[in-house]
Image (tube, grey):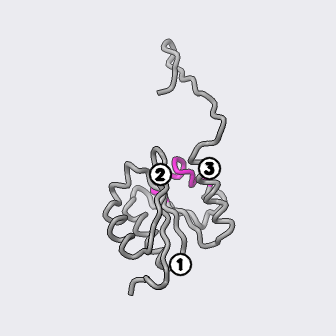
Amino acid sequence: MNKFDPATGKQFKASASTQSYTTYFAEALIAEAEADKDVVAIHAAMGGGTGLNLFLRRFPTRCFDVGIAEQHAVTFAAGLACEGIKPFCAIYSSFLQRAYDQASQIASSFLSSYMTIHSNSWLALYCYQTLAQAPM
């Protein structure tokens, strides 16, 4: 909870000496995408909260908003990874429950590995596929 003035309700926000974790994530992903044309970003109607709105400005054809469909975001990322694309799927952790089956069954069954990057309120899944384990 932020400090506030009880008489007016106005919040006092402390200025941060660093950028937010979300901004660092977005900038790092943009740097990866500048170096690799196969990097894409996926979010479920949370571009601002995940920082992917910054990615969208830089790469409008490589950022996908799937709406409030976290299940589709994870399945879409798995499908892209099976075709050699490198998707980063950023989902609020409280909403990942909607895509639990996809993350635990589909993504882990078809992909050689995936990595989670956690923050306080969201996480990102990075999926990749090796040709030797591509589904038949």
From mark 1 to mark 2, how far is it between C-alphas? 24 Å
- For disc 3, the marked residue is 24
Which residue is denoted by mark 1 in the rendering? 84
Q: Residue at x 41, y 50 (%)?
A: 93
Mark 3 surroundings: few (<14), some (14-19) or many (≥20) residues within 10 A: few
- Nearer to us in this view, 6 or 16: 16
Q: Quadrant of residue 109?
A: bottom left
Magenta span has 49? yes
Which amino acid, mark 2?
His
Residue at numbered disc 2: 118
Nearest to N terminus: mark 1 or mark 3: 3
- Which residue is depicted at the point 45% across and 56% down? 44
**Residue 60 x/y as whole percent:** 62, 63
Where is residue 30? Give x, y as percent. 64, 59
* Residue range (magenta): 43-54
Residues at marks 1 and 2 touching, judged by CB atoms closer than 8 Å: no
Callout 3 secondary element = helix
Most extreme residue toward the bottom is: 136
The CA distance from mark 2 to mark 3 is: 13 Å
Point out the residue furthest to the top here.
Answer: 7
